[in-house]
Amino acid sequence: MTKTSKIAVTLVLAGALVAAALLARHWVGGAPAGRAAGPSRGGELVATNRSEPTSFNRYTAVRSTDELISRLTQARLVRIDRTTDALEPRLAERWTVSDDHLTYTLFLRQGVQFSDGVPFTSADVVFSFQAAYDPSSQMAGELDVAGQPLQVTAPDDHTVVLTFPSVYAPGLRMLDGLPILPRHKLVAALREGRLGEMWGLATPPAELAGLGPFVLAEYTPGQRLVFTRNPHYWRRDAAGTPLPYLNRLVLAIVPDQNAEVLRLEAGQSDLMTSETRPEDIASFRDAAAAGRLQLVDVGVSRDTNLLWINLRPDAKLSPARRAWLQSEDFRKAISYAVDRQQFVNTVYLGAAVPIYGPVTPSFGGWYVPGLPTYPYDPARARALLAGLGLADRNGDGVLEDRRGDPVRFSILTQQGVDTRERAAAVIQNQLRKVGVAVDVVSLDQLALIQRFGTGDYEAMYFGVETTDIDPASNVAFWLSSGAFHFWNPGQPKPATDWEARIDELMRRQVTTIDLAERQQLFAEVQRIFAQHVPALYFAAPEVYVAMSPRVANATPVPARPQVLWNADVLAVKEGGAR
Amino acid sequence: MTTAHRRLIGYAVRRTAFALVLVLLVSSAALVLVDLAPGDVTAELFAAGLGPEAIARERHRLGLDRPLADQYVTWLGRAVRLDLGTSLRYQRPVRDLLGERIGNTALLGACALAVATLVGLPLGVVTGSRRGWLPRAVRAASLTALSVPPLISSLLLALLAARTGWFPVGGTGLAEAGPGALASAATVAWHLTLPTLALALPFAATIERLQSDATAAALAEPHIQAARARGVGDGRLVWRHALRPALRSVAAIYGIIIGTLFSGSFAVEIVTAWPGLGRLMYDALVSRDIYLVAGCAAAGSVFLAAGTLASDVALAALDPRLRQDAP
Amino acid sequence: MTRALGRLVVVLVVVAAAAAPWLAPHGSSDQFADYLNAPPMRLHLLDTGGRWHRPFVHPLRLVDRLESRYVEDDSRRVPVRWFAGGHLWSTDAPDAPLLLLGADRLGRDVFSRLLFGARASVGVALAGTLGALLIGVLVGGLAGYAGGLADELAMQAADFVLILPAVYVVLALRATMPLVLEPARIFVLIATILALVGWPMAARGVRAIIAAERRRDYAAAARSLGAGHLRVLVRHLLPAARGFLAVQATLLVPSFILAEATLSFVGLGFVEPTPSWGTMLYEAARNVRDLGAFPWLLSPAAAIVLVALAVQLATAGDTGSGLLWRAGPGRARNLQID
């Protein structure tokens, strides 16, 4: 068995696993449209998006809207199929791997043209890598392996050879994040060191060129982005019809979520680029039953929120407070004290599942059921707190430590994000019942991140998006030296034995090729994590995606952009005029 | 030209100079204060998954690693030449961003002003000159409207729109407008209804109350009473003789109303998702886009200062007593 | 008549705020997990069998959690207990709270929160208004009376404060303070900020009035009779501004109630367990569509309008609202950004 086919097999296996998990999801209302009759070309869909783009240059702009625009207007060498999480060919038709797993040879699709008609060759790929590693780019981190860049060469016009500095198990998965840019448009700017200034929002759309299904036709700040079909787009459907099906896709900028929902319900828009809020599910469900909307439960979210206590050695805490606040038993006591079902009911109106760790059931083969947990048990919470020398010494209902200081700490959370603020209020309420007083402080996102950066806080409730389920792409969270190792980031050397153990397992995990072995290693990582609970997880929401009945051929997924990740095959349902 | 005229012009010129200094002071203060506030624009990149090195690079690129005084002096040097710099978040000239939003806010403000005037003024004349159930009802409605802050009125109207679907909520509607200027105009007008009403309500009430009192006061003046005694009809008395003097009080606050309306309403623009100056200022503040914040503060304060100025000048022109000791 | 009514309402609100812990059936942050967004409960006297009882409620039973739909469980009667446990009224059963105005999204009793919120909101708004008027009278009075350079400087300062968006100041100021503040300290801070932000309009108006009155005969007469400057200002001139100040108060109180919520936006508002009307309203405003299904979440809006209206009515007769035009319809504009 060659290495290539072995990888193919593992990928197929992984894909099958996830596909099986995805089969469990169900359609809540409105049948999946447009499956029977082949979708027809033409028509327009309107999607609402809450924020403005910051640039049309994805290499310097990393916010979610910029990424969405890049997905619509540019193409990648390979793509992760969001429904199966398997790698699928895009601009690279196929690829081979050397025996030492260090060299990948990619064979590019022939006859592909940019939206301005210029042919796409391996020179564009080499250029894109150069641009990505340019100091002005924000891409480099995503394309580094163990801090080193890849070597890229092009033996001929349609072949690219990538050399990895060390064995990297996820392999080409990282290329899903690299849009291929037109060399002919940007190479001069790169040479002159002006790449960072290129393709700002003031750039006339005609100057942009891409390999994606759509081209930007119009940008009216504060109002909308209009995309039209890229006439040179290379993909065709099974029947040979050139994609995309849609003539136009409008991204209306609607900063307020209420307004977004009202527009969708009024039929002024067809979909939202974010998931449905828990409190909107009920009315969408009614609208779906009446045929006015499609509502899809796409499964458990991969983006989780977590509560962590500042474990940094430089945390500004008195020694007495540090003794209990940073202790493992205190975290376990919190876990025992919070009734996760009530958390689910209150924060997500029941549309969530209780969880105990960062890897939710929607992580396919990476999810490990039956890990050790510390479920709701106030008596055990009290016992653990008593073991830390915390007791209600003055009968006021709040525990005190040995010096008589109240057991009180503050949880910082993000202002304006309902689910986070509600979650903090629920945690506050439940901890009060075991005698722990919590002050909830809502800060705006930037102030919160600033506090995180300086380490000037006691506890935080926050979350980030997961881009890929492969744990190797989330090492910044798992490694003790990582920037997203929230409770104690950027450690020069692991502060605890178990963190050292996780570091070791993760390093092996990243460089191991065999998928089963990798999953075993990662299961061990999760087991250690679950034992020491450096961060507390309470619930992962069910993701619901709502669309107008006009939208056909959609395959919504839990991760953003839930519907538009597959924009080239979206279509308007027959007779679906607005 | 009379001495009084000259004095009035001198007063206006002096106040204008002061107002310009004021605008510069306010925008400077906004820039410095927001720069002092915790977090900067690059912190958002952390949430987008970027590591500390990449963020440090971005801070350097944006010049945020320079000392505050340094950044401020650079900005000031440009600002006096009317160059407001580049937005950190959008990477576009602040002037362009402001231009787009001022148009939207001005459109909304002009509509609200028109509605407030067309509703408030005639009603004020009626309530000021008549007795009976109608003026009393109008007065009660006015007092109620004055008690409803714009946040609450826009919430109620948005709720009404959501329940009935009579009006759209959110944006200008241009994103979905059909082709053609007429269709666009119709869509925008339809989308304007809600924010206009929310914004106009308290001002209509203010104008009604003022006009009512002023009309009543004017009708009590001896020369009007004399006209009445001569047998001048009631309608003519009210609309011809009393209206002009009574208009003065409304004219005097018109400047401030315009200034307030045109500097952008935060509450109304947020709830109704109208892409105006208030909304932009809020977004700039939240993302610590210091140059955009300073630009918004400048734009807002220009309108407000101009409004106050216009009011003061109108006041001085209308009331000689005040002009004598006008500062 | 209307004036008496206005005053009565103001007094009632103040009394209700003071007696909140006794009048409220529940604590302000007690969460009833099975009562999220629950509708107001009805007090019954008649049971299903047609028998009369002392006032009682039926507990609510959740029918659909996503919709927050409830039905009355009329198989159970929970009597209202009077004067028990330090509360005027309450229920005995922890699973059947007394929700006279329904519950909010976290299952907290809206009625109790409204009462407790009145302390924070009305208290801070009144204190802030008082402070703003005091500064306004001081600055405006002196400026109007002295004239000249002092006048000019004072009015420029007023314009500066009027135009400077105060949220920026508060945002920067907040960073210098500890993360967690005592409620009493928050109260003082907010009242101070409101006063510092709200005075310019009052000052402008007072100045205009004093400057005009100063030239009137009676002031000159008082002066020539040997009265000191301060005496003339306080005894003879300031009373002329009374009506204007009343109008200012009616404008400032409701705008300050909302401004408190704006301050919580930049991290300087009341936090749990101290509710305020402003923050309650902002929480409700997060989801406009929900308000249709759970209109009781709008009760803080009703309370704000009621108080504003009452303050207006209470001062209605002697406002001489014609004086309003001298100062304009300014609210705490720079704070509320509206």
Image (cartoon, coloured by chain):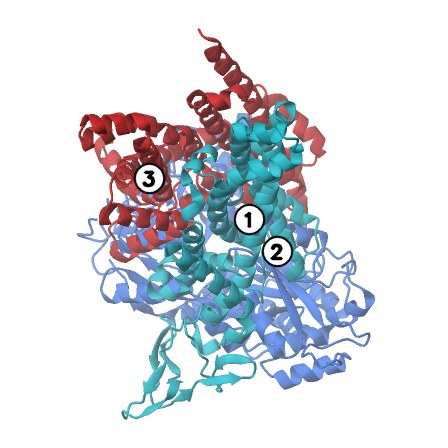
Chain colours: A blue, B red, C cyan
> Are the residues at dot 3 and dot 2 in contact (C-beta closer than 8 Å)?
no
Q: Residues within 10 Å of mark 2 (few under 14, many from 20)?
A: some
Single out the mark in the foreground, 2 or 1: 1
Mark 1 residue type: Thr
Q: Name the residue under label 1.
A: C129
Taking depth in this image into account, of B165 and C113 the one nearest to the observer is C113
In the picture of the structure, the residue carrying the numbered disc 3 is B208
Query: How many other residues sit within 10 Å of disc 1, few (<14), some (14-19) or many (≥20)?
Result: many
Secondary element type, mark 3: helix
Q: In which quarter of the image is residue C101?
A: bottom left
Circle 2 sits on which residue?
Answer: A168
Kind of residue sitting beneath label 3: Glu
C-alpha distance separating marks 3 and 1: 25 Å
Q: Point out the frontmost of discs 3 and 2.
A: 3
Identified at 31% across, 49% down, the residue is B141
Residue type at tag 2: Tyr
Does residue A167 appear in this view? Answer: no
Q: Which of the pair C124/A271 is nearer the observer?
A: C124
Answer yes or no: are tags 2 and 1 on the same subunit: no
**With B256 as the anchor, is A285 left or right in this view?**
left
Looking at the rendered structure, the secondary structure element under dot 1 is helix
| Residue with the most extreme top position | B1
Looking at the image, do the residues carrying marks 3 and 1 touch, with CB atoms under 8 Å apart? Answer: no
User: Whole-percent x and y of residue A533?
Assistant: 66, 72
**Mark 3 neighbour class, 10 Å CA radius: few under 14, some 14 to 19, many 20 or more:** many
Element type where label 2 sits in the image: loop
Quick one: C36 or A77, which is closer to the camera? C36
Q: Which residue is drawn at 50% across and 18% down?
A: B12
Instruction: Evaluate whether residue C163 shows in this view.
Output: yes
